[in-house]
Image (tube, helix red, strand yellow):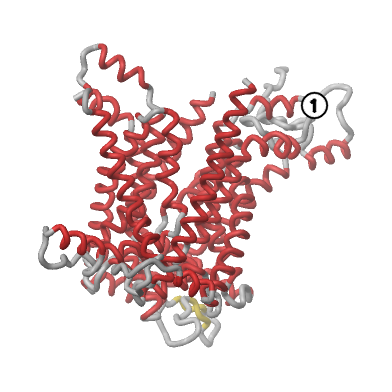
Amino acid sequence: MMPPPVHPQVPLSPPPGPSSPTLIGYLWRWLLGFPFVVRVRGLAMGTVSWGRALVTAVPFLWLLLFFGLPFLVVLKLSFSQAVLAQPPYTPLFSWAEDGIMVLRINFQNYLLLVQDSLYWVAYLNSLRIAAIATVCCLLLGYPMAYAISKAKAEFRIPLLMLIILPFWTSFLIRVYAWIGILKNNGLLNNFLLWLGVIDDPLPLMHTDFSVLIGIVYSYLPFMVLPLYATLSRMDESLLEAAADLGCRPGKAFLTITLPLSMPGVIAGSMLVFIPSVGEFVIPDLLGGPNTLMIGKVLWTEFFSNKDWPVASAVAVATLLLLVVPIVRFQKAQEETAKKTEEGRT
Amino acid sequence: MRHWRPFLLFTVLAFGYAFLYLPIMSLIVYSFNESRLVTVWAGFSTKWYGELVHNDQILSAAGLSLQIAVINATGAVILGTLAGLVLARFGRFRGRTAFTTLITAPLVMPEVIIGLSLLLMFVAMENVIGWPGTRGMTTIVIAHLTFSTAYVTVVIQSRLSQMDVSIEEAALDLGAKPAKVFFVITVPVIAPALVAGWLLAFTLSLDDLVVASFVSGPGASTLPMVVYSSVRLGVSPQINALATIIVGIVTVAILVAGYLMHRQEKQRLKMQ
């Protein structure tokens, strides 16, 4: 008879030998998960450990209940109809008089999204503004992250702190600061008038431009930090080798630094692009009546029109739009996580 | 090219930091303005600070926001540490993909969608199990916990996967129970990440307007909600004063944290 293969990861049987416990002792130890501690990457909870199951279950169930399940509720509600009641929508399922469950699916909300050009314009405008803002953040953030990674070692942490510091102050207040700067008698226009560059104040506020400035300003740290993380991890010897072999700095940057920093570029771009598509505060405070963005449309449908089903349909459609970038972001996250673990071992 | 590269990099940094800080500076300067018109300088005055400390609406909203932020930060560190352990130490298990999705999706999910979906969830729960009856502080805390846990998890997971696991392994080999290993060895090592995560969750909660607006009920207004309704009416020097106070607190906190980290680093170098 072949001896059973030894799997240190899966100790299903109690350890052999004279110290083999009785059934009750076995059960007791099984409950505590004590003797069967397995080394699953360091801190082990044991394969049969209750502790391990609990540690997994608590955050998992929480997120499932308050993050996963709500999307199903939104999906369900997007097929119902708005009514003047509390809550203001019709139930999807109802019982008819003869005890048959009736399922009333209403495609009206989605039809509205397709037919009314307002929603199309809002979707396309959100995508356009978010894309331009992402490119601007990249153009400004990449040189900054590069410069920080090339700075003297003792300056790097303070410089990074200075990038993060605005993030710790209120987002709302930082957006508010731009109202005072961009409005017709605001600081920027007054400054330009004083310089004599312009004769009449430029209409900067309540335009796509002001929304763009607001997004770039608010999301710039989200671009710089992942970029810095990849740039600072880079192996300098590659660049030295290239220089030794006669490669010019410009070419070395394009052929070595840029490709190697792509994970940071992708993570940063997604961190800017995805939330700014659904941004509400910035288009609401800095944008004008013509700046339609999908987050603001959803807000108006919900708070002003009290049309919960249409708001849900808008949310579902936005999610469908963002599924591809979100999955892409997730892959990038997992790859970086893998790399840090490989870097450790 | 080689010659003026440092100059170029310096210019880039100067421009970038000017872009980040000039708006905040302008807020601070005009909070000391005598005139109600934010853009016309009419002399130095601290009267807006005086009005701010007597603004009961802002004060009570700030109190509520701080309470929510503290509860949220503490809860998020607990949930985030558990989730970070799962991701960094438990290897592959059934449902891991679902787990990572639930962790990373809140990082980028637009706030309007999180807010709407949670509100609808609360309404549905109320219909089915009769809880939570009134919306207010409890629902805001639950909502904030849900998205800040994701951020805290990322912070703690990255610290856990950089950490040297051999100490944990040694303790386990010597017979320590996993829970003891965690509290005696892991927690002290990842303590900076726990503090960073707590502060991050605290700020996220204090900063949130959109999600709180969806899930809050009548009577429960957080600080961002009050600031938002006042900002919508136009620029107000009281908000500038509030901004200055917030920037002041954050700057002091970061300087203290920076100093402590610097000192710790020095001690570590001395010991080596």
> Which residue corresponds to the image point at 23% horizontal and 62% vertical from the top-left?
A125
> Which residue corresponds to the image point at 43% horizontal and 71% vertical from the top-left?
B238
Taking the image as shown, residue B143 lies to the left or right of residue A202, namely right
Camera-side residue: B63 or A323?
Answer: B63
Q: Quadrant of residue A169?
A: bottom left
In the image, residue B89 above or below residue A88: above
Camera-side residue: A29 or A134?
Answer: A134
**Quick check: can you spot residue B124?**
no
The chain carrying label 1 is: A
In the image, residue B234 above or below residue A143: below
Quadrant holding the N terminus of chain B: top left
Residue B259 at x, y percent in the picture:
55, 39
Residue A82 at x, y percent in the picture:
40, 81
Mark 1, residue position? A15
Amino acid type of the residue tagged 1 in the rendering: Pro
> Which residue corresponds to the image point at 26% horizontal and 38% vertical from the top-left?
B11
- Crowding around mark 1 (Cα neighbors within 10 Å: few <14, some 14 to 19, many 20+) is few
Camera-side residue: A230 or A336?
Answer: A230
Taking the image as shown, residue B122 lies to the left or right of residue A217, namely right
Residue B182 at x, y percent in the picture:
70, 38
> Which residue corresponds to the image point at 28% horizontal and 71% vertical from the top-left?
A113
Q: Quadrant of residue A202?
A: bottom left
Count the labels in the image. 1
**Quick check: can you spot residue B35?**
yes
Camera-side residue: B154 or A212?
Answer: A212
Residue A16 at x, y percent in the picture:
82, 24
